[in-house]
Image (cartoon, rainbow, N blue to C red):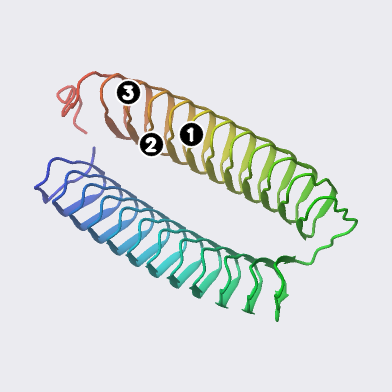
Amino acid sequence: MRGLISDIGVSGKWFQVNVMRGLISDIGVLGKWFQVNVMRGLISDIGVSGKWFQVNVMRGLISDIGVSGKWFQVNVMRGLISDIGVSGKWFQVNVMRGLISDIGVLGKWFQVNVMRGLISDIGVSGKWFQVNVMRGLISDIGVLGKWFQVNVMRGLISDIGVSGKWFQVNVMRGLISDIGVLGKWFQVNVMRGLISDIGVSGKWFQVNVMRGLISDIGVLGKWFQVNVMRGLISDIGVSGKWFQVNVMRGLISDIGVSGKWFQVNVMRGLISDIGVSGKWFQVNVMRGLISDIGVSGKWFQVNVMRGLISDIGVLGKWFQVNVMRGLISDIGVSGKWFQVNVMRGLISDIGVSGKWFQVNVMRGLISDIGVSGKWFQVNVMRGLISDIGVSGKWFQVNVMRGLISDIGVSGKWFQVNVMRGLISDIGVSGKWFQVNVMRGLISDIGVSVKLVLWVRQQALPDS
């Protein structure tokens, strides 16, 4: 639709390419099949020798990609991915206004999310890991253990050596350098602080620093955790096993502990009336508010920056929620677990009865979602998804500046990409189908056959 496709060579089975105001050139296909969606982007010099893969690019560039493993999926918006070598099983990379270069994969798989950041010179020899970077830089990382997770926002992590099992590091506008790990694992959260010259000889520890300094710390006992940021802790009563409290320009009052243990991090926020009846949980809040929280499951972890979480009921195993300048309200969880990432969006009235799902929202809205199938993944940027019923196996929906409403799914699976379009009243009775719409309209579509190459081509006007 209003695009250009030139110089395409096909030697495999089949493929589908949709381009609007973009260019795809010099494509060699040696595997089974693949699918590429490009809007105002460029894909060049792609060699495919594995099974299949899927790439979505909007205002980005992907060049010099070699695929020798099974498959992978890459989503890029206003970013650049170059010189990627894949020798493992598969991986998934999401990049928005970032850069990923010189990545070598020797392990099983990994997932990397980058927004306005840079990841370079990453060597992976372990099992897998997950890295989230927002306006930060990760360079010269060596992984020798099992796996780890690193979250960086406007920070820098350099020269990290890992010889233990695993660890988790969160950095926001801070610096971590010259860290030696000899014990089991540890977790470090830094925001506008500095941690240097830390020696660990005990079991494990966790340190959170914001606009403070911790130096020359010797650990000889079991473990400990210290959080310091120009705050105040007063009138604390302890009746349980143990607990940990982090306060930055905030207030914690009326805390009752009846479970095993928990961890709470607060920056310029307020936590009141907290009841703990499960195993443990961890909550990180920056310029937010958490009130009326009931925990009856195993555990969960919530990260909030300039957001609000209220009236949360947990009945499943565990879940993880990351919110930046968003709002999450009235969440009921009865399935296994789920993960929700929200940036400048809103998620309300979500009921979960299936296994699990993952939702990424940026400047969008998701409301009234019912899940009865296995799982699904939804990516929304400046879009709207409402009144979705799922009774099949799974599906994936990518929406940018579009609208999807009143969708019923009774077949196996489907995938819909919409940009500045509208899809309404879709019934699926065949095997599967795929629809890409840009500045168009598709309505009242019935599919009962296996493959439809050209439908109503003569009736469509030439634009």
> Relative to residue 351, is residue 52 drawn left or right?
left
User: Which one is closest to the eye, mark 3 or mark 2?
Assistant: 3
Cα separation, mark 3 vs mark 2, equals 14 Å
| Residue 15 placement (x, y as % from top left) | 18, 41
Residue drawn at point x = 68 percent, y = 48 percent: 280
Is the residue under label 3 in contact with that under label 1 (CB below 8 Å)? no
Position of 330 relative to 219 (above/below): above
Q: What kind of residue is marked 3?
A: Gly
The residue that label 3 is drawn on is 411
| Residue 299 placement (x, y as % from top left) | 63, 45
| Residue 178 placement (x, y as % from top left) | 55, 79
Q: What kind of residue is marked 1?
A: Lys
Residue drawn at point x = 43 percent, y = 39 percent: 377
Location of the C terminus (image quadrant): top left
Cα separation, mark 1 vs mark 3, equals 19 Å
User: Which one is closest to the eye, mark 1 or mark 3?
Assistant: 1
> Relative to residue 4, is residue 177 drawn left or right?
right
Is the residue under label 1 in contact with that under label 2 (CB below 8 Å)? no
The residue that label 2 is drawn on is 396
Q: Secondary structure at mark 2?
A: strand
Q: Nearer the viewer, residue 38 or 388?
A: 388
Q: What kind of residue is marked 2?
A: Gln
Q: Earlier in the sequence, mark 1 or mark 3?
A: 1
Q: Earlier in the sequence, mark 2 or mark 1?
A: 1
Q: Secondary structure at mark 1?
A: loop
| Residue 71 placement (x, y as % from top left) | 27, 50
Position of 86 relative to 53 (above/below): below
Q: Which mark is residue 355?
A: 1
